[in-house]
Image (cartoon, grey):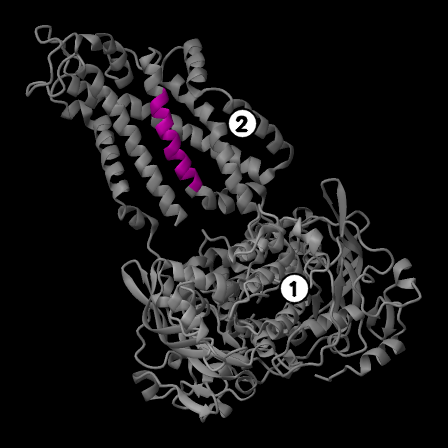
Amino acid sequence: MTATEIAAAGSVDDLTPTLQVEHLEVTHRVRGDDRRALRDVSFQIGRRESYGLVGESGSGKSTVALALTRYLPRNGRVTDGRISINGQDPLAMDAHALRELRARTVSMVYQEPGKALNPSIRIGRQVAEVYEVAGLDGSVAQDKAEAMLRTVQISDPGRVMGLYPHQISGGMAQRVVIAMALAAEPSLLILDEPTTALDATVEAEVLDLVAALRADFATSVLFISHNLAVIAKMCDRVGVLYAGELLEEGPAQQVFEEPRHPYTVGLLRCIPRRGQRKDAGRLDTIPGFLPSPGHTLPGCVFAPRCPIAEERCREAPPPAFPVGPARSSRCYLHDETSNLPRNTPVEVDLGSSRDATEPVVSLRDVSKTFTHGGESVRALVGVNLSLERGETLGLVGESGSGKTTLARALLGLIAPDDGSVVELDGTALAGEARRRPREQLKALQIVFQNPDSALNRRHTVRRLISRPLQKLAGLSGARLRERLSDLVRSVRLEERHLSLRPSQLSGGLKQRVAIARAFGGGPRIVVCDEPTSALDVSVQAAILNLLADLQSKEQVTYLFISHDLGVVRYLSDRIAVLYLGRVMELGPAETVFAAPHHPYTEALLSAVPSIDGQRADRIRLHGEIPSAANPPSGCVFHTRCPRRLSSGICETTEPPLAEVAPGHLMSCHIPIDQLTILQRTEQDGD
Amino acid sequence: MTDVAAEPTTQVAVASARGEMPPWRLLLRRPTFIVGAAILLFWVVCAIFGHLIAPQDPFAQQLLATNKAPSGAHWFGTDQIGRDVFSRVLVGARSILVIAFFATVLGTVAGTALGLAMGYLGGTFDIVGGRIVEAVLALPLIVVAFVFVAALGPSPPTIIVVIGLVFTPLIARTVRSAVLVERQQDYLASARLLGENRSYIMFVEVLPNVLPVVLVEFTVRLGYAIFTIAGLSFLGFGVQPPTPDWGADISANYGVLPAGYWWMTLFPALAIASLVIAINLVTDSIEQVIAS
């Protein structure tokens, strides 16, 4: 550090904001064109403050983070504005000062912990390196590293230090990355979607950890996420970014409770909240698309999608109006946001609801064992389920719980073990789709999570949607064309999309194509495997509405897999909770969501952050999901169960899946009345 | 299914920012591609029209003008029996390009089919195929070609078949690994759920997605084929004299290099080099465009 920098660092006091960004503008040069990625972005983060930047993909969230540390790609540069970190300007720094800044003042944690760690260096070495850079000796650095790993709640740091990154789980890897980020005791910690790649239970633990460490280390935090609930949980203040502009800013709670920009209002309405369900009304949507990068809209960037936009909104960009203490909104009409008109009518006609119980598909004793290097891994163990006509069965559980395996076994994409029975209308189905006749293939279809993988990128939309009409519905000629245009209209695509290829469509449109394909043959059951997880919130709402509408029209049954419990609750009639390939709880959606529930369900529910204020922290799951190759004895959940009985029965005997109330099944040794008492105090009725 | 409740139609506007340039336009923006393609085009024109544009008869022996150094009358000089080297180089493009092209096409078609089958069907087929590929990989191309051509007699069809068959497993191996990547994709599961049969999935679903790999493999192999054919000709197992041929002409004339008659060897050699370099430039450009 040079003398001037020491002087500068020395002058930092509690009154100087850790980060100050003023009128930041970033431009990317793409094929000779300058595309503005950020326009007039100003915000500041005070000492020990946690600031959230929320926005959909393409809003420029990550560009802000990259600009702060001057990690912009080669074609990107800051074209206007000022950045100040602890009073220093990173934009004016030479290479040495910049290195010092990145080493000591600012740390970053990214989405993929696996990519942040060097796969060929042991964990201990990588963490110790941070201390060695700071000038400590080898052995001192090792000790410090071990202490730091303990601080991030890694229970056996000595052992973990000797491991390579591929030997630890994603959650543990993210803890290691956080440990490395905090090791330098930075003034500013930038977290860019740090938990997006993690399971809800692991996410909850990591978020708790970050919150605790923030207090201990007196670090300011810039938290970037697309997930409003995570931001609501983690941040004091929040900025809503859209198309490179900060549209609204203010204390997180106020912004989420009483948004003052139409975009924020729209975003919040897109999310199923407070136990909202499909029969209670459609989700609102935000029509249209994010303006393309490099757009030259003269007025407000949100005007083309705004339901209340006026002439002036399209003519000149609105300035940041102060709308309260420490709050601002870039909207001329910030006073009218509380009664913003809906874009999508709320009323729903779910038809004659569902007919009485009429099982379409039953699974009996369905098991699936994979063999991995001589070890047999039981991905599914004796699952019994039935799906009724026109209902949605939600399937929840952490990754590795067997959700996708169950769906694939039902579809015939993998053959279940011998002795497993999958019945369609009382007829046993062949294990592999290849051996099933057309009528059976027609009955079972799927919408995958990632439309980029699910749609053949070399085929046109016309071909993608026509193929099931030919193969499964047996149509051709004029009848095919007629059905095709019906189908296209019902998923709200347009004729002109038919000649395009998937790469020319946005994520939401691609998913509509995938839905059209699944419905082409007139299916009875559609598996929805995380159909909205790869989509932005505003697009997710439109897809969920579409799925609900199609279901009520066609009386289709859904097997709906999602890690987003709000979404599952919105769409599902019944819910099955899976853990290590076993059904832990099964029952009507509202029953499963309300206590008493299985301790595992309880843990899943407490892990999910909510936008609507803080839920009382109930129980946390610690440790990793055990290996399916070597499942725990007795109740497979006992190793992580916070309500394990002291009698020892949980360790020795597997509880049966018993009916605790009509239609409500649970696999737990704790009597239902006792669960009610244990969980009653924590019930918050949302 | 009827139209369910109308939603604002703006919902479904094409993401306009994705206006992508067609790949061939990206290729034309690369100078390396332009240079490579121009040289390649030149030799292709020679292969087709060489006998028409050659200034002199490549077969005509001018016994009064043997071993003439390059001059205005003979740009590349004359050889030991007084034939015009420039005309022979132009016309000589035909045999090597025709044989290399058909050999590579044969190898690419067969290799792609084999690679698709190994990658998609997997199992025993893949294991057996994999062993054969490894066995072929262990053999030097020119030696294998030499043995077969020596046994079957040096005719262009024989050379095409031999080189094509040697290329087949090499191309199959590359295509196979591309297919393995595609096999992870969900669109194949979707196709299975539509009841598509295996050959439809392999050739209609998977093949279009591995075509870029096939194209690169084709151009790489074309370069190798040119070397191999020139080598065979040089050894006397290629195109037979007096047909103009670069490899055969080098072979016929390199003996007089020490006497200072460099032009009759150098120019056919430069022709081979320029053709191979041109193909490599084109290959590199295609690879870079595909990668970007």
Residue at 57%, 62% (x, y): give it: A183
Q: Nearer the viewer, residue A370 or A389?
A: A370
Kind of residue indicated by mark 2: Val
Label 2: chain letter: B
> Which chain's residue wears label 1?
A
Q: CA distance from mark 2 to mark 1?
A: 43 Å
Does the magenta run of residues contain A487? no
Looking at the picture, does residue A617 appear above or below residue B18? below
Q: Nearer the viewer, mark 2 or mark 1?
A: 1
Name the residue nearer the viewer: A531 or A439.
A531
Q: Which residue is mark 2?
A: B133
| Range of residues picked out in magenta | B213-228
From what the image shows, is residue A435 above or below residue A636? above
Q: Residues within 10 Å of mark 1 (few under 14, many from 20)?
A: many
Same subunit under labels 2 and 1?
no
Q: Quadrant of residue A397?
A: bottom right
Whether residue A585 is visible to the viewer of this picture, yes or no, is yes
A259 horizontally vs A32: left or right: right
Q: Is most of the magenta stretch helix, strand or loop?
A: helix
Q: From where the camera sits, is residue A445 visible?
A: no
Does A62 sit left or right of A403 as displayed? left
User: For mark 2, does the 10 Å Cα neighbourhood hold few (<14), some (14 to 19), or many (20 or more) residues?
Assistant: some
Q: Which residue is mark 1?
A: A199
Q: Quadrant of the N terminus of chain B?
A: bottom right
Q: Residue at x 73, y 84 (%)?
A: A684
Instruction: Identify the secondary structure beneath mark 2.
Output: helix
Residue A463 image point, x, y percent: 47, 55
Residue B77 position within the rendered picture, expressed as x and y whole percent measured from the top left: 13, 16
